[in-house]
Amino acid sequence: MKGYELDVTYDCNWHCDYCIAYTHEQPNRKFEDVLEEVENLPENISSVTLAGGEPGMLSKEQIEEIMISLIEKNKIIDLMTNGLFFEKYPNLVRFTDEIFYHCVEDLSLRKDIKFYPEFMNQANRYYVLVAINESFEDVQYYIDKYPEIKFLILGDYRGDNLIKIKEFLRFIQYNKDSINERTLIEFTTDIGRI
């Protein structure tokens, strides 16, 4: 199964330090260009991840037009969002397969983050929390606050933010029954890359 990441917009309502998209540094995409990209998707692409920027920044009409085109092409639709998509378009979530909901690494500044267990308690839907060395307590706060959600916890391995691997592993082991099982798989994969 071959996937494709489609940046539907470069606009975003967050400014995350860990963002690797650098979308705030460039002019926004023209919607006509996005539709053209959808139209010209290679046949061997089976799944398309709506990303950006934040897909929830598009209008309902724009999102629906993209999704209808992808469904007509028999593509699986995945979604990467900071949660704005859920707030604005809850009725469209059902057309997605895999969802990655990401949150900023400085979670202490985001005590207002809203989680939507009704959308996420399925096999291919993950709430992603990014942990840095100073944020274990904040990550624990969300794990404890939402026991019905099994979070996927990712460590930050960028330069100066390189997570203390032993502490992170201890944290994962301590919470192993409360976090998504993919956390350990992702941790092992990331350690192999360092």
Image: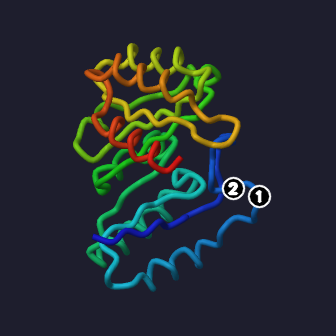
Q: Residue 21 in the image: state x and y as whole percent.
A: 63, 56
Q: Which residue is nearer to you in this view: 5 or 185?
A: 185
Instruction: Give amino acid for label 2.
Output: Tyr
Asked where in the image residue 152 lies, by quadrant, the reply is top left
**In the image, is residue 58 above or below residue 123?**
below
Q: Residue 88 in the image: state x and y as whole percent.
A: 48, 44
Q: Residue 22 carries which label?
A: 2
Label 1: which secondary element: helix
Residue 119 seen from this side: no
Label 2: which secondary element: loop
> Are circles 1 and 2 on residues that touch, CB within 8 Å?
yes
Asked where in the image residue 47 lies, by quadrant, the reply is bottom left
Residue 183 shown left or right of residue 123 in the figure: right
Check disc 1 and report the residue beneath it. Answer: 25
Query: Is disc 1 surrounded by few (<14), some (14 to 19) or many (20+) residues within 10 Å?
Result: few
**In the image, is residue 172 above or below residue 162?**
above
What residue do we see at 49% from left, 50% from top? 193
* Separation of residues labelled 1 and 2 (CA atoms): 6 Å
What residue do we see at 46% from left, 62% from top? 63
Q: Which mark is residue 140?
A: none
